[in-house]
Amino acid sequence: MASDDARSRILEAAGKVFAERGFKDTTVREICRKAGVNLVGVNYYS
């Protein structure tokens, strides 16, 4: 499913951004950009 793929990309991107920037300095916008997911739609996949 496309939603499973998007969810996986979000989780993978989040792990990478958290590792690079730390939890406090990570934004949802950055995670979405790296995952290639629409910022508005991120709540749908979480």
Image (tube, rainbow, N blue to C red):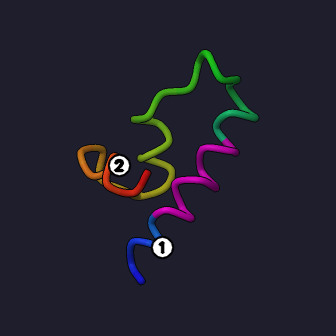
- Badge 1 marks a residue whose secondary structure is helix
- Packing grade of label 1 (10 A; few <14, some 14-19, many >=20) is few
SS at mark 2 in the image = helix
The quadrant holding residue 2 is bottom left
Q: Which mark is residue 42?
A: 2
Q: Is residue 13 magenta?
A: yes
As drawn, is 18 to the left or to the right of 36? right
The location of residue 37, given as percent across then percent down, is 37, 56
User: Where does the image place residue 15, in percent across and percent down from the top left?
Assistant: 69, 45
In the current view of this chain or complex, which residue is farthest to the right? 19
Q: How crowded is mark 2: few (under 14 residues within 10 Å), some or many (20 or more)?
A: some
In the image shown, does 44 or 9 lie closer to the viewer? 44
- Of all residues shown, which one is farthest toward the left? 40
Residue interval drawn in magenta: 7-16
Q: Name the residue under label 1.
A: 4
Spatial CA distance of label 1 from label 2 is 12 Å
Q: Which mark is residue 21?
A: none
Which amino acid type is marked by label 1?
Answer: Asp
Residue placed most toward the observer, 41 or 13: 41
Amino acid type, label 2: Val
At 30% from the left and 44% from the top, the residue drawn is 39
